[in-house]
Amino acid sequence: MNEKRASSDARGTQRKLTLALAAYAVIAFVAGTTLDGKLRIAIWILLAALAVKTWIASVSDANH
């Protein structure tokens, strides 16, 4: 029974990660089409950092 729950939790975590990264991608796309110059670059860097932090937290959570 615990294996089934662990599998379900892993799928839920994977889905949350996918949705979060997709949201970052949508925001980056919108920023790319509406902003220009240094502000666009800064937003892209911020979103990339958040995506990496989210991915690291997901991997860390999966290992525990």
Image: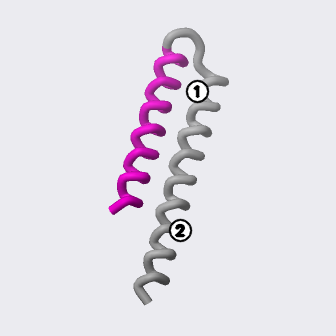
Q: Residue at x 41, y 84 (%)?
A: 2
- Check if mark 2's residue and mark 1's residue have beta carbons within 8 Å: no
Residue 59 included in the magenta stretch of the image: yes
Residue 22 location, x and y as percent? Answer: 59, 46
Q: Is residue 37 left or right of residue 56?
A: right
Q: Residue at x 61, y 39 (%)?
A: 26
Q: Provide the residue designation for mark 2.
A: 11
Quarter holding the C terminus is bottom left
- Counting residues from the N terminus, which is met first, the one under dot 2 or under dot 1? 2
Q: Nearer the viewer, mark 2 or mark 1?
A: 2
* Range drawn in magenta: 39-64
In the displayed structure, 28 sits above or below 8; it is above
Q: Quadrant of residue 24?
A: top right
Q: Provide the residue designation for mark 1.
A: 31
Q: Quadrant of residue 36?
A: top right
Residue at far bottom of view? 1
Q: Residue at x 58, y 31 (%)?
A: 28
Q: Is residue 56 left or right of residue 38?
A: left
Task: State whether the magenta stretch is mostly helix, strand or loop.
Answer: helix
Q: Amino acid at mark 2?
A: Arg
Q: Residues within 10 Å of mark 2 (few under 14, many from 20)?
A: few
In the displayed structure, 23 sits above or below 11; it is above
Q: Residues within 10 Å of mark 1 (few under 14, many from 20)?
A: some
Q: Amino acid at mark 1?
A: Ala
In the displayed structure, 59 sits above or below 13; it is above
Quarter holding the N terminus is bottom left
